[in-house]
């Protein structure tokens, strides 16, 4: 069974995945890294050239490919929950952990990261993040087996909690 990490940009999915890999001795599969590998370019460039719909299609293809793997830690992109088929595939092969943090924490974590394309193209990063988080929160809640407070704890502390919940 896989450990699946979901949550907003900046929630710490990648850092927690690395910490979990150490704790659980499992490989990490990053859906975003696999998307970039298949696309042959960075996500920001792919979205700029092809658009969000094409990105979501490729993301769904990647999820269909990685979800059936066994005993992995799957680090997903923040919008993976936008398609129910993705959620169904991830839940079928694993336990889903939602890493939660308030907008202020998320914004502070990603403020200097130019590799994250704008989701709306028309708002400030904080306003965009707040709107997207408000829209996605019910989707994260419905997808998750467990909700984890990721606002103030280290990736190692979060990994330890997930490990306790997983076994």
Image: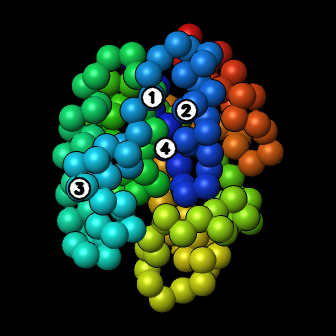
Asked if residue 57 lies left or right of residue 123, the reply is left
Badge 4 density bin: few <14, some 14–19, many ≥20, Cα 10 Å: many
Q: Which residue is mark 2?
A: 17
Of discs 3 and 1, which sits in the foreground? Answer: 3
Residue under the image location 64 percent in, 76 percent down: 126
Q: Which residue is mark 1?
A: 28
* Residue found farthest to the bottom: 122
x and y percentages locating residue 81 in the rendered image: 38, 51
How far apart are the alpha carbons under marks 2 and 1?
A: 6 Å
How far apart are the alpha carbons under marks 3 and 2?
A: 23 Å
Mark toward the start of the polypeptide (2 vs 1): 2
Badge 3 density bin: few <14, some 14–19, many ≥20, Cα 10 Å: some
Q: Which residue is mark 4?
A: 6
How far apart are the alpha carbons under marks 1 and 4?
A: 14 Å
Question: The N terminus appears in which quarter of the rendering?
Answer: top left
Front-lying residue, 101 or 57: 57
x and y percentages locating residue 73 in the rendered image: 45, 27
x and y percentages locating residue 141 in the rendered image: 51, 46
Q: Which residue is mark 3?
A: 39
Element type at mark 4: strand
């Amino acid at each position: 069974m896989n450990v699946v990490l979901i949550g907003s940009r900046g929630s710490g999915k990648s850092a927690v995945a690395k910490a979990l890999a150490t704790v659980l001795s499992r490989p990490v599969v990053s859906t975003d890294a696999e998307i970039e590998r298949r696309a042959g370019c960075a996500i920001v460039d792919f979205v700029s050239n092809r658009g969000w719909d094409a990105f979501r299609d490729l993301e769904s293809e990647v999820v269909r490919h990685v979800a059936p793997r066994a005993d992995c830690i799957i680090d997903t992109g923040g919008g993976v929950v936008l398609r129910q088929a993705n959620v169904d595939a991830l839940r079928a092969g694993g336990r889903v952990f939602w890493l939660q943090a308030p907008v202020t924490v998320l914004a502070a974590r990603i403020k200097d990261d130019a590799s994250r394309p704008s989701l709306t193209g028309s708002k400030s990063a904080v306003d965009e993040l707040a709107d997207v988080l408000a829209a996605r929160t019910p989707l994260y809640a419905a997808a998750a087996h467990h909700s984890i407070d990721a606002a103030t704890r280290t990736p190692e502390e979060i990994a330890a909690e997930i490990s306790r919940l997983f076994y």
